[in-house]
Image: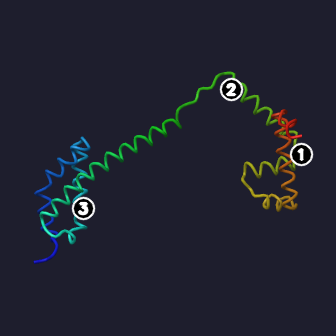
Amino acid sequence: MSDALTHAELEQVFIQARADLQRRIRHRVRCPERAADLTQDLYFKLVRLADRLPNAVEAKRYMLRMAANAGLDDVKNNQNRARLLEGLAVLYEPTVESPETLTGRRQEVRHVEAALAELTPRRRDMLRRSRILGESYAEIAAAWGLSVRTVELEIAAALRHARDRVRPEAASDAG
């Protein structure tokens, strides 16, 4: 006699235990359809383990333990999924801002636009390439035929200018 169950023997044990397995899973997940799906999944996992199960008694004991674990895992996965979806829902909630806040934001945008308009064309282009297009300083330097250090200085000056125009109090603190 072999030391392990054959696939046919394992299938027979599964068929005999199927109702118990499904009942055990349904007790955890509270959904007959989901319990049936998880029970079927157990069979596919068991087929891979057939050569490790020595006899029908051990196989049934193992199946019942797997069923309990499958039910618990499914409940935990659903709880985790629900928590994740709750967290994501917060990200998509529309934000309602007061008219004063909107007016303040629009005014800030106008200040930024005005500050950028005051920049030299070269500084404006370098800032756009760096911050909007995501180009490296080396790429910008090559495009303008300048050193990387010059690009660094130009962009730093452009950022200081924009900061000072948008938030004048920052200029007095930095000075």
Relative depth, front residue between 121 and 68: 68
Image height check: is 22 above or below 174?
A: below
- Give residue 135's position: percent from left, percent from top: 74, 56
Secondary structure at badge 1 equals loop
Front of the two marks 3 and 1:
3
- Give residue 64's position: percent from left, percent from top: 19, 55
Q: Is there CB contact under 8 Å for labels 3 and 1?
A: no
Per the model, the C-alpha gap separating discs 3 and 1 is 69 Å
Q: Which image quarter holds the N terminus?
A: bottom left
The mark that comes first in sequence, 2 or 1, is 2
Residue under pointer 2: 102
Picture quadrant where residue 57 is located: bottom left
Picture quadrant where residue 48 is located: bottom left
Q: Which image quarter holds the C terminus?
A: top right
Three-letter residue code for mark 1? Thr
Q: Which mark is residue 120?
A: 1
Residue under pointer 3: 44
Within 10 Å of disc 1 (Cα), the crowding (few <14, some 14-19, many 20+) is few
Secondary structure at badge 3 equals helix
Residue at horizontal 88 percent and vertical 35 percent from the top: 172
